[in-house]
Amino acid sequence: MLNSNPATEDMIRDMAREARSGIRHIFLHWTGGHYGHNEDAYHICIDRDGTVYVNCKSFLSFKAHTWMHNVGAIGIALLCGYDAHCWAPAGKDASLLDVAYENDHLARTDCAVIDYGEEPPTRKQIEVMAKIVALLCHELCLPLAEDTVMTHCEIAFVDGYGPGDGDPDMRWDLWFLPEPDTLGGALYPGGLLLRAKAQYYLDTAEEA
């Protein structure tokens, strides 16, 4: 069910409460497509300006967003990433890399290199995704942890189809993301960044 009408925070909150007993994971993606091109494979999509679309009537609805993990899971995607590419250093376990660069001339031989293409994740998309994760975790009573909230790249490493694994259907959604406070132009591990931001929003909401 593709939805062309922006979702509200209250709508997401109510849907999360209704699905509370059936959700065990949240998986974070990008579509690998264009800005403004909503995708029905995900429960929630976020456009470049932070506009949020909910593509289901229930978060318990089946969506084919994450291989082998589509039951009891919410898929959230940023509408971006068209023609993006990544390179993992030879001879390294890509799942253990903790730094990447957008420009290969800045990268060391032990770093990943990322080319986001012409439609990269925007700062607004990243912040809105983190806010939605915080809202969902609160309303679902779901712990905000690295085994409950994961990027597609993180779960792809677990299941053997991440960068460097040699799988022709490799997925690397949100492997690394830009963070303005990172020194030297380095990119930050996407899962760590999004969970940290979500934790901030969760803590802020609980203090209010």
Image (tube, helix red, strand yellow):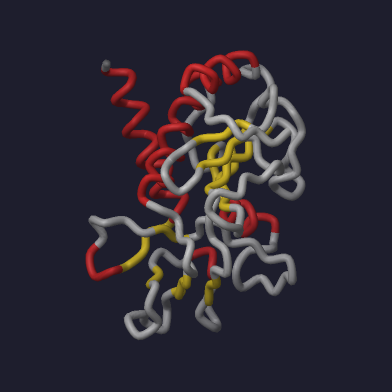
Q: Say which residue appears at 51% left-offset and 42% top-offset.
A: 46
User: Up-down: is 36 above or below 89?
Assistant: above
User: Up-down: is 97 above or below 59?
Assistant: below
Q: Quadrant of residue 42?
A: top right
- Expressed as whole percent of the image width and height from the top left, the position of residue 159 reads 69, 56
User: Up-down: is 197 above or below 7?
Assistant: below
Residue 72 is left or right of residue 177, and the answer is right
Q: Say which residue appears at 50% left-offset and 28% top-offset.
A: 143
User: Up-down: is 185 above or below 26?
Assistant: below
- Expressed as whole percent of the image width and height from the top left, the position of residue 107 reads 36, 80
Q: Say which residue appears at 32% left-offset and 67% top-offset.
A: 186
Residue 40 is left or right of residue 109, and the answer is right
Q: Quadrant of residue 26?
A: top right
Which of these two is toward me, 89 or 198?
A: 198
Residue 127 is left or right of residue 41, and the answer is left
Quadrant into which the C terminus falls: top left
- Expressed as whole percent of the image width and height from the top left, the position of residue 31 reads 61, 53
Which of these two is toward me, 154 or 119?
A: 119
Quadrant into which the N terminus falls: top right
Q: Quadrant of residue 14?
A: top right
